[in-house]
Amino acid sequence: MAFVAKEFRHILRDRRTLLILFGMPVMQVLLFGFVLTNEIKNAAIAVLDPSKDTESIALTNKLISSGYFHLEQYLVSAEELEPAFRKGKIKMAIIFPDNFAVSLNEPSSLSRPAATIQLLGDASDPNTATTLINYSNAIIADYQREKFPILYPQSPQIKTETRMRYNPEQKSVFNFVPGVMTMILMLVSAMMTSVTIAKEKELGTMEVLLVSPLKPIQIILGKTAPYLALSFLNAAVVVVLGIFVFGMPMHGSLLFLAAECVLYMFVALSLGIFISTRAKDQMTAMFMSALGLLMPTMLLSGFLFPRESMPWLLQMIGTVIPATWFNTIIKGVMIKGVGPDVLWQQTLALGGMALFFLTLSMKNFKDRLE
């Protein structure tokens, strides 16, 4: 019993062990509980309504009031559709025909078909696009059921036409190839960098480096340069496999994509260096990397689960995760063919993160072991 009591005291004194025992399960339950859901809420949509009559306005209000959508933009013309999709402002667009109320209230026949509504989904994320289209069809069907309880469903007065932009075949690989690239670059760049510098501390060889003529910035660059090269090689392999094996498109500039990959890897390396300056051994560095980088990248960046369905707090946390911005950049360049004129905000965000974490790392990096 005395030996058991001693072990309890050792465990209670070790904050790292307590964090693993109690902190990680609580965090995982909370994250998976809030994030693991197929339901999408507050998805940004645009409406093109040339008729602007009572019926089209009523149907639009019914769609918005469902909680699944929020109206991001009222379009004036069809020419505004492409810029809205390319900039990533909207996930879906609803296009009403002219004189929608007249077409709806006149009985449909062979000579006069039912009123047609177009639903355009951004299929660069095929799962989200399919879900939003299904939501829309269900709400439109419910609207018809309320307005024409006798005619519907034998004679529907509204017909929906669905189109998927950027990914007509709705291939899931269009979502997973960018996500896998984001994960691999973060794993190799950040986690391996944090572990290798912590390993020098743990083995005591950091003292040899610190007393050498090398400056701290040279030590950091020397330790991270190989991982930067290997990460870039991994990125190239993923892109080649995605294009030639899985049929991923490459509509944008390959040079611009390569520059964005280097910037993202630099952010990840800066994070790895920062973690290594705070960790005293490899286990701590691995734990901090997995808990602070790997899990948020998987769950909160929009790779596996739509960010629109997450609570406000988790969405805010997601905005400070580099993968959230990089995932948008990859899809924008490869699938939509956009460039710096559209993705400058995401690029600026990654550049700011890289500068911030590198400055923080250099401040924490000591010339001597404490």
Image (cartoon, rainbow, N blue to C red):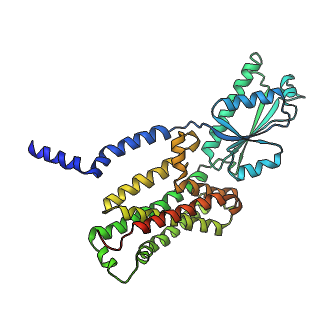
What residue lies at 83% left-to-right and 26% top-to-bottom?
Answer: 104
Q: As displayed, is residue 50 above or below residue 240?
A: above
Q: x, y (%) of residue 187?
A: 45, 60
85 or 368: nearer the viewer: 368
Q: x, y (%) of residue 165?
A: 71, 48
**Residue lying at the far left of the rendered structure:** 2
Q: In which quarter of the image is residue 197?
A: bottom left
Q: As displayed, is residue 140 above or below residue 91?
A: above
Relative horizontal placement of residue 35, taking residue 148 as reference (left or right): left
Q: Quadrant of residue 284?
A: bottom left
Q: x, y (%) of residue 302?
A: 55, 48
Relative horizontal placement of residue 343, taking residue 28 as reference (left or right): right
**Residue lying at the far bottom of the rendered structure:** 213
What residue lies at 80% left-to-right and 30% top-to-bottom?
Answer: 56
Q: In which quarter of the image is residue 111?
A: top right
Q: As displayed, is residue 155 above or below residue 259?
A: above
Q: Can see residue 158?
A: yes
What residue lies at 45% left-to-right and 74% top-to-bottom?
Answer: 221
Q: Can see residue 265?
A: no
What residue lies at 59% left-to-right and 49% top-to-bottom?
Answer: 172
Q: x, y (%) of residue 49?
A: 81, 37
214 or 109: nearer the viewer: 214
Image quarter hosting the N terminus: top left
